């Protein structure tokens, strides 16, 4: 222990911060960039589809980027100290990535999650040494995380900070990475980039970067039917709430989060949950592996935008994201019994998506929920 008033404690503190930053830099250096997978669909000659495979990160989702940024941000703001517990509210993917980085830095991490989170995600957090504090009502997670913070934990606070923790001007953020990978393609300046909105971090980074680079690419938010973002964006209303719940994890928030930036989103496409789930199987057929529900939501929105381009005789590229692995949904979205219990039948929507892909004309994908 250092006597009060000596500067030694703060110098030790800075040493630890520098070491922690060094570990994060080493981790970034060891990690490869994620693939940009190209897809061509029969009904859309002249329109190229690209999917950034964010499931390829060491922790299996696009939240790997966010978690790295949130730890960097907490460290550089002097909010995270040696031995301090770390907490965040997360529906799962962020928690897994944050637990992984906590282990890297030798810190104890607690995830505050809704009790209905996919069991597989809870197991993943615990396997990384994290703890899960499950709350019955998803609306309680913020309050519970704040309680941990009041007791001394560092609150990584993804929903408040995702929008600002990432360096939107470059540093190989997701937008810079995508555009670099497209440089040699037939349409290097995409007509559209499509992503969902959870924290709003990804859409904020992409939207800012497109303007910063002076590109004409438009940004489309692909969201579950009736999400808070859908209502908030249409009315520019920060008090909007969702008009129906969704089973698609990671997006479709019930409230307008602090990181939702409405001005940089050019279009919002609403996707029924059954259509998102049907699109997961379409992705599996075309890519040979399974991706999560929000990746399906993205695919449906890409197809709708492509039918509009085709109607106008436009050629070009559309880029979207594969946000996480399908294996995380073995017991939920990919389980026929679970779907039946939740009144979801993806079969009609799957038929409609296949018809759209074959014809290039929009067949509305319908289905329960
Ligand atoms: C977080 C998340 C999103 C949305 O990304 P944000 O940057 O938080 O808006 C989409 N899909 C999955 C699986 C996610 O975990």
Image: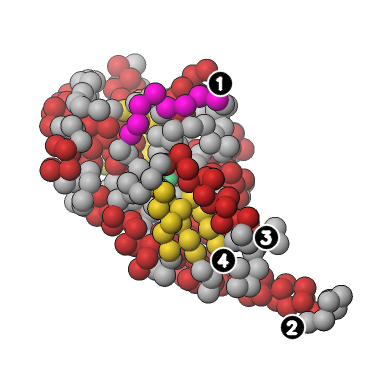
Q: In which quadrant of the rendered view does residue 280 lie?
A: top left
Q: Residue at x 42, y 41 (%)?
A: 138
Horizontally, residue 172 falls left or right of residue 118, namely right
Which of marks 4 and 2 precedes in the sequence? 2
**Disc 2 + disc 3, Cβ < 8 Å:** no
Q: Is 245 included in the stretch rendered in magenta? A: yes
Q: Rounded to the nearest whole Å, what is the CA distance between mark 2 and mark 3?
A: 21 Å
Name the outermost residue toward the right: 5
Residue 90 visible in the snapshot: yes
Lower position in the chain sequence, tag 1 or tag 2: 2
Q: CA distance from mark 3 to mark 1?
A: 33 Å
Query: What residue is pinned by disc 3?
Result: 79
Instruction: Identify the residue position indicated by label 1 in the image.
Output: 236
- Mark 2 lies within 8 Å of ligand 1 (Cβ measured): no
Q: From the viewer's perspective, is residue 23 above or below residue 66?
A: below
State the image coordinates of residue 360 (x, y, percent, origin top left): 22, 24
Whether the residues at callouts 3 and 1 have beta carbons within 8 Å, the answer is no
Magenta: predominant secondary structure element?
loop
Between the C-alphas of marks 1 and 2, the distance is 53 Å
Q: Residue at x 21, y 23 (%)?
A: 366
Q: Earlier in the sequence, mark 1 or mark 4?
A: 4
Mark in front: 1 vs 4:
4
Residue bearing the label numbered 2: 1
Q: The N terminus appears in which quarter of the rendering?
A: bottom right
Mark 4 vs ligand 1: CB below 8 Å: no
Number of callouts? 4
Instruction: Tell me the residue that label 4 is attached to.
Output: 85
Q: Nearer the viewer, residue 252 or 292?
A: 252
Query: Magenta segment range?
Result: 239-246
CA gap between label 2 and label 4 equals: 19 Å
In primary-sequence order, the first of circles 4 and 3 is 3
Question: Can you say which quadrant of the picture contains the C terminus?
Answer: top left
């Amino acid at each position: 222990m250092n006597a009060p008033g000596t500067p030694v404690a703060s110098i030790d503190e800075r040493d630890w911060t520098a070491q922690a930053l060094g570990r994060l830099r080493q981790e970034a250096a060891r990690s490869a960039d994620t693939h940009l997978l190209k897809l061509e669909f029969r009904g859309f000659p002249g329109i190229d589809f690209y999917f950034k495979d964010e499931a390829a990160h060491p922790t299996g989702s696009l939240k790997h980027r966010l978690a790295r940024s949130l730890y960097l941000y907490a460290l550089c703001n002097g909010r995270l100290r040696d031995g301090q517990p770390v907490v965040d509210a997360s529906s799962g993917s962020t928690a897994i990535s944050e637990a992984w980085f906590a282990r890297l830095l030798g810190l104890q991490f607690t995830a505050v999650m809704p009790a209905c989170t996919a069991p597989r995600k809870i197991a993943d957090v615990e396997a990384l040494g994290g703890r899960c504090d499950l709350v019955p009502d998803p609306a309680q997670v913020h309050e519970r995380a704040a309680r941990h913070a009041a007791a001394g934990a560092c609150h990584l606070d993804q929903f408040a900070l995702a929008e600002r923790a990432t360096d939107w001007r470059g540093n190989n953020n997701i937008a810079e990475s995508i555009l670099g990978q497209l440089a040699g393609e037939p349409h290097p300046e995409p007509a559209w980039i499509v992503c969902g909105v959870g924290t709003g971090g990804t859409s904020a980074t992409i939207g800012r970067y497109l303007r910063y680079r002076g590109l004409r690419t438009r940004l489309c938010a692909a969201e579950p039917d009736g999400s808070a973002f859908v209502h908030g964006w249409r009315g520019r209303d920060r008090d909007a709430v969702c008009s129906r719940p969704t089973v698609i994890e990671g997006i479709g928030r019930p409230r307008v989060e602090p990181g939702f930036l409405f001005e940089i989103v050019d279009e919002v496409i609403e996707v029924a949950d059954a259509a998102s789930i049907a699109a997961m199987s379409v992705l599996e057929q075309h890519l040979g592996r399974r991706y999560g529900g929000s990746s399906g939501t993205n695919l449906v929105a890409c197809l709708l935008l492509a039918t509009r381009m085709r109607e106008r005789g436009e050629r070009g590229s559309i880029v979207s994201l594969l946000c996480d692995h399908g294996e995380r949904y073995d017991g939920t979205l990919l389980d026929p019994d679970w779907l039946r219990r939740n009144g979801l039948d993806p079969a009609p929507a799957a038929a409609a998506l296949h018809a759209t892909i074959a014809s290039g004309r929009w067949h509305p994908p319908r289905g329960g929920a």
